[in-house]
C-alpha cells in the first residue's frame, strides 16, 4: 500500500475518532462513543507512527461494527446529532473498503518522491478536513441555541 494512501486512512480514522469523542460529550451513549473514538483515534495515530496497517482484518470488522453502531444510535432516545454520526460512519466505511481492496489485490509498496508524498498528504488532509470540519461544528454545538439567538445565564432566550 502506498504510504500516501496509508496516511489518508490514518487521517480518516483520526477524524472519525475526534467526531465520536465530540459526540460523547453531550450524549446518553457517551461511554460507547468515547470508547469508539479512542479506538479510532489510537488506530490512526498508530498507522501514522508505525507506517503500516494495524490488524487490517480486525480493522475492517471493527469499522463495520462501528458503522452499525452509529446507525443504531440514530434511533435511540436522546440520540446524538445525526450528521456527525453519519460523517464518522462514512469515514469508517471508506477506511474499511480501502483496506479490503488492498487485502484483495495487494500491490507492492512503491517509493514516492518527497514532493509527491507531501502533496498527497496535503490533498488527503484537505479532503478529510473538508468532510469532517462541518460535522465537528455540528457535534460541538450539542444542545446549544440555534444561530441568531442568545441564551443568558438563566437559560432564557434573548432576541
Image (spheres, helix red, strand yellow):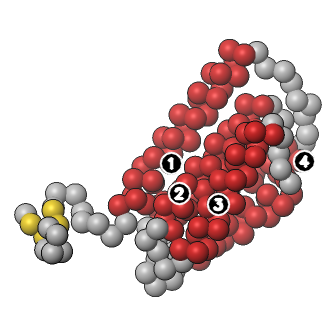
Q: Where residue 7 sits in the image (x, y, percent)?
A: 71, 37
Residue under label 1, please give it.
Answer: 132
- Rate crowding at label 1 as few (under 14), some (14 to 19) or many (20 or more) other CA atoms within 10 Å: many
Report the side of 30 relative to 53 (left or right).
left
Q: Is residue 77 shown above or below 62?
A: below
Is the C-beta separation of discs 3 and 1 under 8 Å? no
In the rendered structure, the answer to whether residue 134 lies left or right of residue 69 reads left
Quarter of the figure with the N terminus:
top right
Q: According to the image, label 2 marks what residue? A: 19
Q: Which mark is residue 75?
A: none
- For the residue pair 152 and 102, the one nearer the viewer reads as 152
The reply to whether dot 3 and dot 4 touch (C-beta < 8 Å) is no
Residue under pointer 4: 104
Q: Nearer the viewer, mark 1 or mark 4?
A: 1
Marks 2 and 3: CB-CB under 8 Å?
no
Mark 1 or mark 4: name the one nearer the start of the chain.
4
Residue 65 seen anywhere in this rendered image of the structure: yes
* Residue 148 in the image, given as x and y percentages of width and height: 16, 57
Q: Regarding mark 4 in the picture, which secondary structure is present there?
A: helix
Q: Residue at x 51, y 45 (%)?
A: 131
Q: Which residue is mark 3?
A: 38
Amino acid at each position: 500500500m502506498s504510504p500516501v494512501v496509508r496516511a489518508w486512512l490514518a487521517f480518516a480514522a483520526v477524524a472519525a475518532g475526534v467526531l465520536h469523542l465530540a459526540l460523547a460529550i453531550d450524549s446518553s451513549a457517551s461511554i460507547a462513543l468515547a470508547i469508539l473514538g479512542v479506538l479510532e483515534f489510537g488506530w490512526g495515530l498508530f498507522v501514522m507512527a508505525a507506517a503500516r496497517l494495524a490488524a487490517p482484518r480486525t480493522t475492517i470488522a471493527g469499522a463495520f461494527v462501528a458503522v452499525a453502531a452509529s446507525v443504531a444510535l440514530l434511533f435511540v432516545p436522546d440520540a446524538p446529532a445525526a450528521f456527525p454520526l453519519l460523517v464518522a460512519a462514512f469515514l469508517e466505511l471508506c477506511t474499511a473498503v480501502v483496506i479490503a481492496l488492498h487485502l484483495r489485490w495487494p500491490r507492492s509498496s512503491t517509493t514516492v518522491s518527497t514532493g509527491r508524498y507531501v502533496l498527497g498528504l496535503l490533498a488527503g488532509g484537505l479532503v478529510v478536513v473538508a468532510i469532517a470540519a462541518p460535522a465537528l461544528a455540528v457535534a460541538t454545538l450539542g444542545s446549544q441555541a440555534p444561530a441568531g439567538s442568545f441564551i443568558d445565564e438563566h437559560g432564557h432566550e434573548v432576541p
